[in-house]
Image (tube, grey):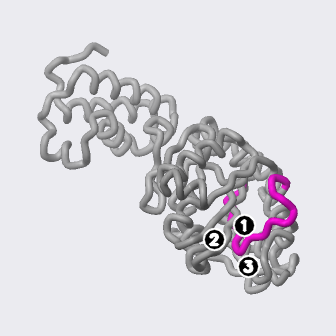
């Protein structure tokens, strides 16, 4: 497409809407606006109040490149490299899952039970959004971020430094690369263990939106045949790493509340609860453990 030197901000936005709609992307208008704001360093008011301003050659080229990526169903967050979560802005790339609003329910539920000075383990940490948010909104807590992916841990490190500050991040967080508890020292203990593990059934992954299926890390999605593989491992092993009276919190799929809560009760967790998300769907299961 040739560049029109007289193109306005509003006209470029309208062009973006048409291109993304033609590509079959969801929320084409919203994505076209957000990408334009990111490319131009503007905000939502610009389209309303200054839609007739001219765009520069560089803004135009940058926007066209972003539209082309979004039209290939690359998630908007991977294009901009960031996502807001718990009122904080996190770096994301294709090595980590994009933080979602549903996971804020998990963080908020942990915060209800989190006290100053507690030690937290975040299994399958990904971008680090769960642990970093908990540390950002608490006092004198420390934690361990564990993940099988070295690349994910590097993203988590950068997010911790970005949000907590480099010095605080070094003092508050340790990073462990490995498969769940295998990454930890056997004598390590935590007041809270939290995890958003892979929980999608393997045969369901191919039915997901292309943004998820083709671009988000498969290892962070695949919960194997019945979606419960990682819950079984975490629930069976977590007790050995909890302090007396410590608690385990996990995010779940909307149809997994009954099964996961049963697994926790069978493993002698007490006061097991299922928490619903903003849509009224089961989203979090937690319980305590007398060790």
Q: Residue furthest bottom?
A: 271
Q: Which residues are magenta?
A: 182-197
The image's mark for residue 256 is 1
- CA gap between label 3 and label 2 equals 15 Å
Horizontal placement of 33 versus 152: left or right?
A: left
Was residue 124 drawn as part of the magenta stretch in this picture? no
Residue drawn 47% across the image and 62% down it: 86
Is residue 5 depicted above or below 170 in this figure?
above
Q: Nearer the viewer, residue 78 or 115?
A: 115
**Does any portion of residue 280 appear in the rendered image?**
no
| Marks 1 and 2 in Cβ contact (< 8 Å) | yes
Was residue 195 drawn as part of the magenta stretch in this picture? yes
Helix, strand or loop status at disc 1: loop
| Residue 88 place in picture, x, y as percent | 44, 57
Helix, strand or loop status at disc 3: strand
Horizontal placement of 102 versus 256: left or right?
A: left
């Amino acid at each position: 497409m040739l560049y029109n030197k007289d193109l306005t901000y509003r006209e470029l936005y309208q062009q973006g809407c048409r291109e993304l709609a033609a590509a079959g992307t969801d929320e084409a208008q919203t994505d076209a606006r957000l990408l334009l704001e990111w490319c131009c360093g503007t905000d939502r008011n610009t389209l309303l109040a200054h839609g007739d301003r001219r765009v520069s050659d560089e803004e135009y080229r940058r926007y066209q490149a972003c539209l082309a990526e979004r039209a290939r169903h690359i998630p908007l967050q991977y294009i901009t490299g960031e996502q807001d979560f718990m009122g904080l802005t996190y770096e994301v790339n294709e090595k980590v899952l994009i933080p979602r609003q549903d996971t804020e329910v998990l963080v908020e539920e942990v915060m209800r039970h989190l006290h100053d000075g507690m030690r937290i383990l975040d299994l399958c940490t990904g971008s680090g959004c769960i642990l970093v948010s908990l540390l950002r909104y608490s006092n004198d807590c420390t934690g361990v971020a564990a993940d099988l992916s070295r690349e994910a841990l590097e993203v988590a490190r950068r997010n911790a430094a970005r949000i907590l500050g480099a010095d605080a991040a070094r003092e508050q967080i340790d990073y462990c690369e490995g498969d769940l508890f295998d990454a930890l020292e056997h004598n390590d203990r935590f007041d809270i263990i939290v995890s958003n593990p892979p929980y999608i059934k393997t045969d369901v992954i191919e039915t997901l939106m292309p943004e998820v299926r083709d671009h988000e890390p498969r290892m962070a999605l695949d919960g194997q045949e019945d979606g419960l593989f990682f819950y079984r491992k975490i629930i069976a092993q977590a007790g050995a790493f909890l302090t007396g009276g410590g608690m385990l919190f996990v995010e779940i799929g909307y149809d997994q509340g009954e099964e996961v809560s049963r697994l926790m009760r069978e493993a002698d967790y007490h006061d097991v609860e299922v928490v619903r998300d903003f849509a009224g769907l089961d989203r979090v299961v937690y319980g305590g453990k007398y060790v």
